[in-house]
Image: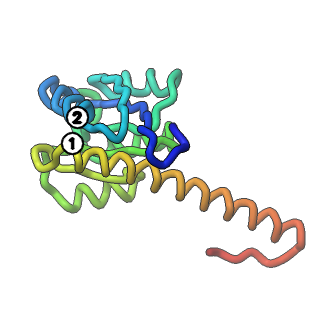
């Protein structure tokens, strides 16, 4: 990623989507964004995603909830269990707020309803997901460091 405020950012995105039309729509939306250069790779199943995530670095994942080998929020659970540090933007055709809340509780940073967002919204969701995940990771690291300091000073443990 670039460091200059006005420079164009580069982000590597893995799109996990089993519908070719939706996949092409996502890629077209990202190609239309001028403030960020998106490099995308696409797969059709969660197992294919696991294969790529195991050997390549991505800045974020765009994840369909219903894939041939995984359905619903279990899809989010499986990917966050194995790759907990990757920011996830969920796309779903199901307009169910309860499902969205469960997906976020399981580790998705953002959820978008298919057919209800454009490239601008997708771009914002990806940037939000990346920044949100970075902040959460930094906070977890600071909490861990504080716990180690407390332990070394023999202070009682406190939660934050």
Question: Residue 89 in the image: x percent, y percent?
Answer: 33, 45
| Colouring used for the render | rainbow
State the image quarter where residue 37 is shown. top left
Please tell me whether mark 1 or mark 2 is closer to you in this view. 2
Q: Earlier in the sequence, mark 1 or mark 2?
A: 2
Q: Which residue was labeled with disc 1?
A: 119
Classify 10 Å Cα crowding around label 1: few (below 14), some (14-19), many (20 and above): some
Up the image or down, 154 lies above or below 72; here it is: below
User: Which residue shows up at 28% across the image and 28% down it?
Assistant: 69
Up the image or down, 7 lies above or below 43; here it is: below
Q: Nearer the viewer, residue 45 or 41?
A: 41
Quick one: SS at disc 1? helix
Q: Nearer the viewer, residue 96 or 2?
A: 2
User: Which residue shows up at 30% across the image and 30% down it?
Assistant: 16
Say if mark 1 contacts mark 2, CB within 8 Å. yes
Count of numbered circles in the view: 2
Quick one: SS at disc 2? loop
State the mark number for residue 32: 2
Classify 10 Å Cα crowding around label 2: few (below 14), some (14-19), many (20 and above): some
User: Which residue shows up at 75% across the image and 66% down it?
Assistant: 147
């Amino acid at each position: 990623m670039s460091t200059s405020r006005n420079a164009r950012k580069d982000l590597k995105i893995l799109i996990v989507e089993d519908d070719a039309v939706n996949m092409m729509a996502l890629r077209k939306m990202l190609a239309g964004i001028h403030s960020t250069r998106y490099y995308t790779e696409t797969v059709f199943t969660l197992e294919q995603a696991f294969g790529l995530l195991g050997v390549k670095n991505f800045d974020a994942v765009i994840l369909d909830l219903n894939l041939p080998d995984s359905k619903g929020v279990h899809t989010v659970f499986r990917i966050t269990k194995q790759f907990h540090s990757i920011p996830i933007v969920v796309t779903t055709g199901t307009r169910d707020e309860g499902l969205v809340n469960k997906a976020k509780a399981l580790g998705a940073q953002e959820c978008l309803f298919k057919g209800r967002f454009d490239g601008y919204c997708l771009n914002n969701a990806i940037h939000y997901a990346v920044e949100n995940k970075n902040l959460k990771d930094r906070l977890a690291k600071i909490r861990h460091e504080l716990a180690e300091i407390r332990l070394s000073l023999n202070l009682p443990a406190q939660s934050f």
